[in-house]
Image (cartoon, rainbow, N blue to C red):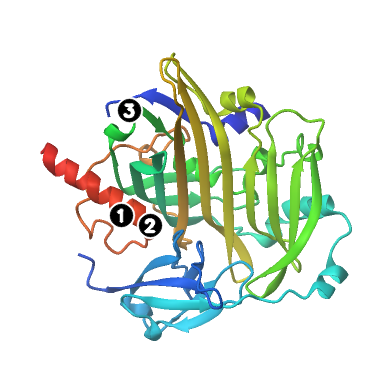
Amino acid sequence: MNHFQKQKLFITFFLLISCFCLAQNIQEFRGKVIDEDTKKALPLADLQIINTNISTITNSEGEFLLKVPNTFMSNSVLVSYLGYKKQQIPLSQFKNKNTKIALTVAATVLAQVDVNAPKDAETLVKKALSLKGQNYLNNEVVMTSFYRETIKKRNKNASLSEAVLKIQKQPYITNRSDAIKIIKARKKTDYSRLDTLALKLQGGPFSSLYTDIIKYPEFIFNAEDIDDYIFSFNQSTQINNKLVFVVGFKQKEAITRPMYYGQLFIDAETYALTSAIYNLNVSNKEQASKLFVKRKPRKATVYPTEASYRVNYRTKDGKWYFGYSNTLLTFKVKWDNKLFNSRYTLQSEMAITDWNLNTTTFKNKPKDRLKPNTILADQASGFADPDFWGAYNIIEPEKSIESAIKKISKQLKKDL
């Protein structure tokens, strides 16, 4: 498989015409993480129960839902956010509802950054990629994750897909690919909002896994392409009270094919990549469309206007691992017989909520595994059931998604 084929596998989407009690041994805590000074919500803040692998993440409104087994009620929660001081809070201080957690900005010691910073940003990035065996998990683990896909027409949610997954995460030092199986899933689409045109994500959860730059560098910084980028140092920051180099990257001006641009956050002490925020250059509409659009109606012209990605890593016992991924794609659809364009947004996010070294979940059950080109199966059940997910930790739904779920549930009842 050549690089172009691999890149298509990473970001391939297609368009098509379509007709398409809580367990007694856990406790729930809901709340919000904010900036102490501005009171603004902090989206994608990490909450991890200390001495366990159980964790969750705040939604775009800073809200979280954390489900904790009773056996861990004496533990504390580590709350962290890029550029802020981490906090360790006993679970005894959490409320079942409306827990407020305020984080303070961490001051960056620029003098220390200047002393430790390598002179060449490109060399730093290559070193970070080469140290995956030293900085990242070297054991095969089974991760529990929550995955959500949303499709919007303009600003209204039209399709929602959610799943709890088990991921067989291979050691970072091997070339073996990760495997996925679905534990629970639900999906429903409001076709009246899509005007008979539906977008679906091919690859689904695998597309989220492929944002793991350390595990899958071939999709962005492969040996053939890395020299076609320009790397530069931006202002440094902190994560978990540790200095972090911020490296900007973009394709060289002479390169015309779609490549990526963004920022890499690299730990100043270990040179581990801790986070990355990046976009695909979609200025060349024709080439970008070939990467994304696999199938479309004949009377429609479809091209992407935005393709943005984010990956966050977490650390335990000195080893980093994939913790969160977010992909946002925006398309314009122009019909031959219509005056105005339609704008669709596809977003997927995956959060690792637990993991362990027990790999028996995947042994001798190849039929249960998803294929890399799998589309998350449509399942209507669950949207009307508030306890659908049981004891699994999930990403708290945003208000707009909650509203869409209620509307879709009402429509389901009318159709019965």
Q: Residue at x 23, y 42 (%)?
A: 380
Check the image and report above or below for 59 versus 177.
below
**Horizontal and vertical percent position of residue 33:** 47, 71
Residue located 48% across and 61% down the image: 357
Between label 3 and label 2, give the one nearer the viewer.
3
Q: Secondary structure at mark 3?
A: loop
**Amino acid on which disc 3 is placed:** Asp
- The residue that disc 3 covers is 195
Residue depicted at x 75% and y 51%: 248
Answer with the quarter of the image where residue 100 lies. bottom left
Which of the 4 image quadrants contains residue 71? Answer: bottom left
Q: Secondary structure beneath disc 2?
A: loop
Say whether disc 3 or disc 1 marks the residue closer to the N-terminus: 3
Q: Nearer the viewer, residue 213 or 343?
A: 343
Q: Is residue 95 above or below residue 205?
A: below
| Left or right side of 406 for 65 | right
How far is the residue under mark 3 from the one under mark 1?
A: 22 Å
Task: Point out the image quarter for the N terminus.
Answer: top right
Question: Between disc 3 and disc 2, whose residue precedes?
Answer: 3
Query: In the rendered image, which residue does mark 1 sit on?
Result: 402
**Residues packed near mark 3 inside 10 Å, few (<14), some (14 to 19) or many (20 plus):** few
| CB within 8 Å, label 1 to label 2 | yes
Q: Is residue 31 above or below residue 253?
A: below
Q: Nearer the viewer, residue 212 or 58?
A: 58
Q: As shown in the figure, which amino acid type bears the numbered disc 2?
A: Glu
Q: Name the quarter where the C terminus is drawn.
A: top left
Question: Which residue is identified by label 2?
Answer: 398
Residue 262 drawn at (x, y percent): 68, 48
- Residue 148, percent from left and from top: 40, 48
Residue 240: % across, % down: 62, 73
Furthest residue toward front: 339
Residue 182 at least partly seen? yes
